[in-house]
Image (cartoon, grey):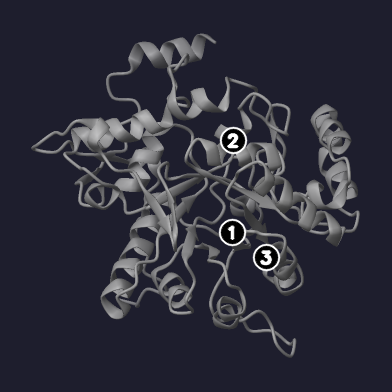
């Protein structure tokens, strides 16, 4: 028999697994949901993505007041335009066939370095914890400006990030040096494998974002064919986190980023090992979100190979209702914190760390089992 060229393993997404209830239950209100990123502690382990349809300075301030965190994109419209509201409105009104060229045009405007400091200061003035995101190639230029203005957390984010990068350039971004240079926590993403995750942690960073291409507005998997379903990616990176803890004595949280549609997905990610989650499309549905009911990917404006699309998500309610309820919808997109607390309660977990021990099963029929009438109702719509 000829040897196989490649051995494939099965990888699992949110719809293919389920959480097994615990033998003991606890009061959900007693559960501790804290997410720790270096010295910062967030009572709500949910982060709003660095996407222009989701996070603006006002949204970042709101998220902080509710106990979570939002990340502002330093390479978005808020640093390219003094008054970005016009550009955001134009994106929302554009016909579908015009969206990508329009985004390419809007994002071709140069970044104004003075606006980086202004946006950071606006968030700090409003009482928010300020986190900002930049791509690796611009980090050395933008990160010091954000830090000088009072930024609290730096996120270095690209479609795929590794600790070792081969390039013809003389010297690229070296995370260990960046961590030493910056006096604020540095989180890095995105990765989906054990090896990449543990190597990133060894550079001294304070957090890792997990996920390549699962986002609702991302088309990386279609364009590049690259990615790993989020449950498997989270489990593999959680293993790296735990091994690194044993190796170094330092706990580096992993944050599952992208692909979430409801509270159930968030609960599954945490059971798979996530310390926190990053959401985009769900928050784009909040009243007053900068996307006006639309959401688009960070890589959509790429001048040659766009990897994202604008999607219509609509508006479902205020941010407080999305986070804490009371829910007015039945699809699980509201009262996300309540859902997570309840899941911890039925699994007998008093903390996120204890929820990591919850049993999970492969259950591809979990979203349809016994749901005949619900599915029929969807078909009739």
Contact between marks 3 and 1 (CB within 8 A): the answer is no
User: Quick one: SS at disc 2?
Assistant: helix
Res. 135 image quadrant: bottom right
Report the residue at 79% width, 47% height from top: 78
Location of residue 91 in the rendering, given as x and y in whole percent from the top left corner: 82, 35
Q: Does residue 136 lie above or below 120 as drawn?
A: below
In 3D space, how far apart are the residues under numbered discs 2 and 3 (Cα atoms)? 21 Å
Mark 3 — residue?
A: 147
Task: In this rendered view, identify the residue nearer to me: 201 or 195.
Answer: 201
Query: Residue 170 placed where, x, y %?
Result: 74, 90
The residues bearing labels 3 and 1 have C-alpha atoms spaced at a distance of: 7 Å
Q: Is residue 213 above or below residue 326?
A: below
Labels 2 and 1 touching (C-beta < 8 A)? no
Q: Position of residue 130 (x, y in %)?
A: 62, 52
Element type where label 3 sits in the image: helix
Q: Quadrant of the C terminus?
A: top right
Residue 74 in the image, given as x and y percentages of width and height: 73, 56
Q: In the image, 308: left or right of 200?
A: right
Tell me the quarter of the picture where residue 195 sits: bottom left
* Residue at numbered disc 1: 152
The one nearer the camera, 369 or 248, is 248
- The residue at which mark 2 appears reads as 62
Q: Sequence order check: which comes first, mark 2 or mark 3?
A: 2
């Amino acid at each position: 028999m000829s040897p196989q060229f490649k051995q494939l393993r099965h990888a699992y997404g949110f719809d293919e697994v389920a959480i097994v209830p615990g033998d003991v239950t606890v009061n959900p209100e007693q559960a501790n949901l804290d997410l720790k990123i270096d010295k910062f502690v967030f009572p709500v382990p949910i982060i709003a993505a660095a996407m222009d349809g989701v996070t603006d300075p006002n949204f970042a301030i709101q998220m902080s007041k509710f106990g979570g965190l939002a990340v502002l994109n330093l390479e978005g419209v808020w640093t390219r335009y003094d008054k970005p509201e016009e550009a955001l409105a134009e994106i929302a009104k554009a016909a579908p066939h015009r969206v990508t060229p329009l985004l390419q045009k809007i994002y071709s405007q140069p970044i104004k370095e003075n606006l980086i400091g202004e946006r950071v200061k606006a968030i700090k003035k409003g009482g928010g914890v300020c986190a900002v995101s930049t791509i690796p190639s611009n980090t050395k230029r933008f990160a010091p400006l954000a830090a000088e203005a009072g930024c609290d957390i730096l996120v270095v984010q690209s479609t795929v990030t590794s600790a070792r990068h081969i390039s013809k350039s003389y010297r690229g971004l070296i995370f260990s040096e960046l961590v030493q240079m910056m006096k604020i926590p540095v989180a890095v993403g995105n990765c989906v494998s054990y090896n990449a995750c543990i190597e990133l942690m060894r550079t001294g960073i304070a957090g890792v974002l997990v996920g390549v291409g699962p986002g609702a507005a991302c088309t990386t998997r279609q364009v590049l064919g690259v990615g790993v379903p989020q449950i498997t990616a989270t489990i593999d990176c959680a293993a790296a986190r735990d091994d690194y803890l044993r190796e170094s004595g330092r706990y580096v949280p992993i944050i599952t980023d992208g692909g979430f549609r409801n509270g159930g997905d968030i609960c599954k990610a945490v059971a798979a090992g996530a310390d926190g989650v990053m959401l985009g499309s769900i928050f784009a549905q909040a009243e007053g979100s900068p996307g006006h009911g639309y959401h688009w990917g960070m890589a959509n404006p790429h001048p040659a190979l766009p990897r994202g699309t604008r999607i219509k998500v609509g508006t479902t309610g205020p941010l407080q209702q999305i986070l804490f309820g009371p829910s007015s919808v039945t699809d699980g997109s509201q009262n996300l914190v309540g859902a997570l607390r309840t899941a911890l309660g039925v699994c007998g977990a008093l903390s996120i760390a204890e929820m990591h021990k919850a049993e999970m099963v492969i259950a591809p029929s979990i979203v349809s089992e016994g749901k005949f009438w619900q599915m029929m109702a969807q078909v009739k719509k």
